[in-house]
């Protein structure tokens, strides 16, 4: 897939479709801009008039709570008008083509589409067909990419660990079906971490794993040795369809679940992350999810700041 479509001829960000092809400088710039918007729960919210008069459309063809809501809030905090397109109640359900839907919303003067779709490549396809002034943000396409999630994860890591270079990061679980893992691996390697590991059952590890630039472990204990950050992924049962790629959830938990005991195998100051939605008792115990190493809710708060940064950069308005 073409990735340079993401940049204006002068190198400025126009769309965010994938981490692939983006330089370390651009990723750091996004994280720096996000820093200006970042607040944790309980702190006063940062608002700006930066995108006043602009219209941002959420085009969601697949369910989402966190991602859609944080995109909407991010747009509102920048004073943009927000249009929410819900496939189940739209004319696409009456047979209108995706491009017709798109051009109709464009005719309502939308400046940005935030797209989630169950087909890999959907956001690229839309980006190839929008008017010149319109930007497209990929909010998750099939198994391919989820770049804003990866960037909010990088932001969270940076808040706690400061420098990426010495870090060893493990991504645990269902890598095969995970667009989040693909984007995280690209981002971590671009930011220059020491090592990215993926840990999981052989059946949930993509065959091209080596090409991704990661070390593969099937044993949790070995994989967690010396690790600074652990990113747990959800078992994506809806994507596994009828293939049974592991014996049972309880067996999966026994082998790959994070508990107070298995956590001891990582570094003492390890960070525990999860993009959500989390299956408690499958990926980790509640004790770990709610424990002192977990930054799972902070990821959600920082997600707002990172999405505000990406929206302002793509629409050419820097704070
Ligand atoms: C992820 C997604 O939809 O790709 N969730 C999210 O955006 N926070 C991961 C998942 O569904 O497990």
Image (cartoon, rainbow, N blue to C red):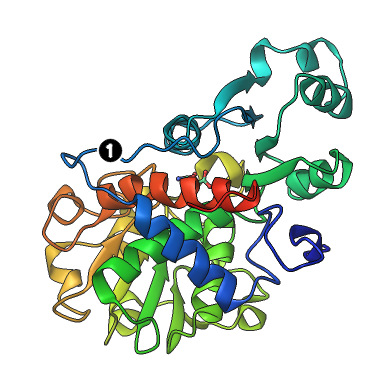
Q: Secondary structure at mark 1?
A: loop
Circle 1 is placed at which residue position? 45
Q: Residues within 10 Å of mark 1 (few under 14, many from 20)?
A: few
Task: Let me know if residue 141 appears in the view.
Answer: no
Q: Position of residue 316 (x, y in %)?
A: 64, 50
Residue 57 to residue 215: above or below = above
Classify residue 108 by image quadrant. top right
Q: With respect to residue 223, does 95 lie above or below?
A: above
Query: Is 35 placed left or right of 56 in the picture?
Result: left
Horizontally, residue 266 falls left or right of residue 12, namely left
Quadrant of residue 114 within the rendered picture: top right
| Number of on-image labels | 1
Nearer to me, 294 or 281: 294
Residue closer to the observer: 146 or 205: 146
Question: Picture coordinates of residue 301 (x, y %)?
Answer: 31, 45
Q: Residue at x 58, y 65 (%)?
A: 182
Percent from the top left, x then y, of residue 105? 77, 22
Q: Residue at x 21, y 38 (%)?
A: 44
């Amino acid at each position: 897939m073409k990735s340079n479509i993401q940049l204006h001829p002068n190198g400025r960000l126009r769309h965010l479709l994938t981490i692939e092809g983006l330089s370390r400088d651009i990723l750091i710039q996004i994280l720096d801009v996000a820093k200006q918007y970042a607040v944790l729960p309980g702190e006063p919210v940062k608002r700006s008039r930066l995108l006043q008069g602009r219209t941002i459309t959420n085009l969601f063809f697949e369910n989402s709570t966190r991602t859609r809501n944080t995109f909407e809030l991010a747009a509102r905090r920048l004073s943009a008008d927000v249009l929410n397109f819900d496939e189940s109640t739209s004319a696409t359900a009456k047979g209108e083509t995706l491009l017709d839907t798109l051009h109709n919303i464009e005719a309502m003067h939308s400046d940005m589409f935030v797209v989630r779709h169950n087909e890999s490549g959907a956001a690229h396809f839309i980006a190839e067909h929008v008017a010149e002034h319109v930007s497209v943000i990929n909010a998750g396409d099939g198994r391919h990419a989820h770049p804003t999630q990866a960037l909010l994860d990088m932001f969270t890591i940076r808040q706690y660990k400061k420098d990426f270079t010495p870090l060893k990061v493990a991504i645990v679980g269902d890598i095969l079906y995970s667009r989040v893992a693909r984007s995280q691996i690209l981002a971590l390697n671009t930011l220059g971490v020491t090592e990215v590991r993926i840990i999981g059952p052989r059946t949930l590890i993509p065959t091209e794993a080596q090409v991704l630039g990661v070390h593969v472990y099937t044993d949790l204990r070995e994989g967690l040795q010396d690790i600074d950050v652990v990113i747990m992924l959800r078992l994506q049962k809806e994507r596994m369809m009828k293939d049974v790629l592991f014996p049972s959830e309880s067996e999966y938990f026994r082998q790959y679940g994070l508990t107070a005991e298995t956590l001891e195998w990582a570094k003492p100051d390890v960070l525990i992350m999860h993009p959500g939605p989390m299956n408690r008792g499958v990926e980790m115990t509640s004790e770990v999810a709610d424990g002192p190493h977990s930054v799972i809710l902070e990821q959600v708060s920082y997600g707002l700041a990172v999405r505000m940064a990406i929206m302002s950069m793509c629409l050419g308005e820097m704070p």
